[in-house]
């Protein structure tokens, strides 16, 4: 069966420090991968998605970046964190169907709560 | 792009009460529609889905019907339990052909059920 894990679960970082959140998927190959952010009291915002190794699409301009060094590994990074980067970060994967059309069903990790002080 | 309007919360109910959480959407083409649930401190998990007009998704006593004519996908449950307390998200999937299956999530509706 497929599993998804992300870490760390909780992180407290000072403003201006770097960030690295990691996500790995097991039990499937060539998944679509996603990073979402959930700010306090708000809905989910798609930050990045990837359809393959080294292929990253950014949905919103920000000081965050994403990388996919391996098929089932997705990393969210920042060189210098801002207070506004605080939130709950969720990694997700979906099956990558032929033709580029998604089925829409996402499978989420447990989430990483980031507090920037 | 797609958009979703979800009933604002928080919603507070007594156990065994009837629940409705409204959701309407705008989308290109014929999206699949999803309800996700987020229990406290956890990630999201799929609650139910419908892939075409008039389909009814159901799971754990929750139901939602894909209404193409009103572009709605309202979530209902006849008798809620304390364990249903969570945040509920409505989400259509972008089927425009270049979207790679991205979901557009609503703001989420917080449901609290009291004994």
Image (spheres, helix red, strand yellow):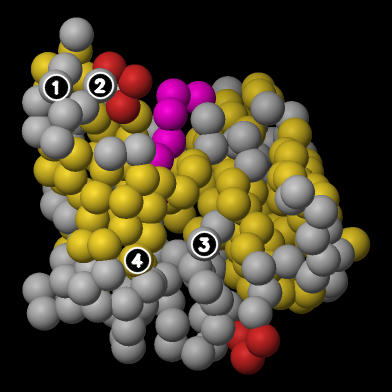
Height in image: A107 above or below B54?
Answer: above
B55 is higher (above) or lower (below) than B96: above
Residue A105 marker: 3
Q: Position of B104 compared to A76: left or right?
A: left
Chain of the residue under label 3? A
Location of residue A15 (image quadrant): top right
Dot label at residue B81:
2
Would residue A73 appear left or right of A58 to someone viewing this image?
right
Identify the mark nearer the N-term, 4 or 1: 1
Chain containing the residue with disc 1: B
Q: Position of residue A58 (x, y in %)?
A: 60, 69
Cβ atoms at labels 3 and 4 below 8 Å apart: no
Residue that label 4 marks: B50
Given contact means CB atoms under 8 Å apart, are the residues at marks 1 and 2 in contact? yes
Kindly tell me whether residue A25 is visible in this rendering.
yes
Q: Secondary structure at mark 4?
A: strand
Mark-to-mark CA distance, 3 and 4:
11 Å
Which residue is drawn at the image coordinates 54% and 52% (left, top)? A36
- Identify whether B57 is placed above or below B60: below
Query: For the residues marked 4 and 1, what is the alpha-carbon distance in whole angstroms?
Result: 25 Å
Q: Do badges 3 and 4 share one subunit?
A: no
Labels 2 and 4: the sequence-earlier one: 4
Q: CA distance from mark 1 to mark 2?
A: 6 Å
Mark 1 falls on what kind of element? loop
Whether residue A43 appears in this view of the structure is: no
> Over which residues does the magenta segment extend?
B36-41
Q: Secondary structure at mark 3?
A: loop
Mark carried by residue B16 = 1
Q: Residues within 10 Å of mark 2 (few under 14, many from 20)?
A: some
Q: Chain of mark 4?
A: B
């Amino acid at each position: 069966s497929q599993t998804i894990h992300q870490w760390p679960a909780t992180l407290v970082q000072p403003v201006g420090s770097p960030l690295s959140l990691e996500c790995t998927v097991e039990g499937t190959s060539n998944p679509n991968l996603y990073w979402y952010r959930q700010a306090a009291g708000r809905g989910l915002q798609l930050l990045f998605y990837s359809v393959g190794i080294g292929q990253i699409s950014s949905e919103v301009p920000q000081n965050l970046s994403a990388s996919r060094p391996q098929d089932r590994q997705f990393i969210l990074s920042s060189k210098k964190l801002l207070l506004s980067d605080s939130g709950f970060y969720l990694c997700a994967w979906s099956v990558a169907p032929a033709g580029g059309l998604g089925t829409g069903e996402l499978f989420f990790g447990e989430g990483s709560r980031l507090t920037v002080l | 792009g797609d958009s979703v309007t979800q009933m604002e919360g928080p919603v507070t109910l007594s156990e065994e009460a009837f629940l409705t959480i409204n959701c309407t959407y705008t989308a290109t083409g014929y999206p699949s529609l999803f309800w996700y649930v987020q229990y406290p401190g956890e990630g999201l998990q799929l609650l139910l889905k419908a892939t075409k007009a008039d389909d009814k998704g159901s799971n754990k006593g929750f139901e939602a019907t894909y209404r193409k004519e009103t572009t709605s996908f309202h979530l209902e449950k006849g008798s809620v339990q304390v364990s249903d307390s969570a945040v509920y998200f409505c989400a259509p999937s972008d089927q425009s052909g270049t979207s790679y299956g991205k979901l557009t999530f609503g703001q989420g509706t917080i449901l609290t059920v009291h004994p």
